Image: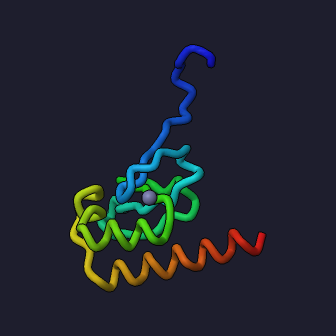
């Protein structure tokens, strides 16, 4: 292995199960500067981000309020439903490509 240098490829970990991956391998949830919470399909939206590795981990993170803590935001069940639907749609798109 090469010596550690700051390449900008930081490892992120899933807030539910703790699995580590490059950020491109994780699903990003973002709290935008305007305060809205959304699924970030691009992984580059401005704002505070939290990562999960799968739709299952998103559901688990919701159940344990881990997403609220990670984003320092209060999410309602409508937020969870909307984000879960966006993640499901994203996963379906990824399979079709
Ligand atoms: Zn996970």
Color encoding of the figure:
rainbow
* Residue at the (42%, 70%) spot, across then down: 38
Between 67 and 30, the one nearer to me in the picture: 67
Q: Quadrant of the C terminus?
A: bottom right
Q: In the shown orientation, is residue 78 left or right of residue 74? A: right
Q: Percent position (x, y) of residue 9?
A: 55, 35
- Please, which residue is most extreme toward the top here? 3
Q: Report whether 86 appears left or right of 57.
A: right
- Residue 69 appears anywhere in the view: yes
Kindly indicate the quadrant of the structure image that contains residue 93. Answer: bottom right
Q: Quadrant of residue 51?
A: bottom left
Q: Residue at x 53, y 48 (%)?
A: 23
Tell whether 21 sits left or right of 81.
Answer: right
Residue 1 image offset from top left, x and y in percent: 62, 19
Q: Position of residue 33 (x, y in %)?
A: 34, 59
Residue 89 falls in which quadrant of the image?
Answer: bottom right
Ligand 1 resides in the quarter of the picture at bottom left
Residue 47 appears in view: no
Name which residue lies at 45% across and 71% down: 56
Residue 20 lies, with reference to residue 39, above or below; the image says above
**Where does the image place residue 12, in percent across and percent down from the top left?**
45, 44
- Direction right: furthest residue: 97
Report the front residue among 54 and 67.
54
Work out whether 59 lies above or below 45: below
Which residue appears at 53% of the width and 19% of the height?
Answer: 5
**Image mark count:** 0
């Amino acid at each position: 292995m090469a010596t550690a240098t700051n390449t900008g490829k930081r490892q992120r970990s899933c807030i539910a199960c703790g699995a580590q991956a490059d950020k491109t391998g994780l699903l990003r949830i973002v709290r935008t500067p305007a305060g809205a919470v959304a699924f970030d399909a691009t992984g580059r939206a401005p704002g505070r981000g939290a990562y999960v590795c799968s739709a299952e981990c998103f559901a688990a993170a919701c159940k344990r309020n881990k997403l609220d803590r990670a984003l320092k935001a209060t999410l309602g069940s409508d937020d969870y439903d909307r984000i879960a639907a966006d993640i499901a749609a994203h996963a379906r798109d990824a399979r079709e490509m």
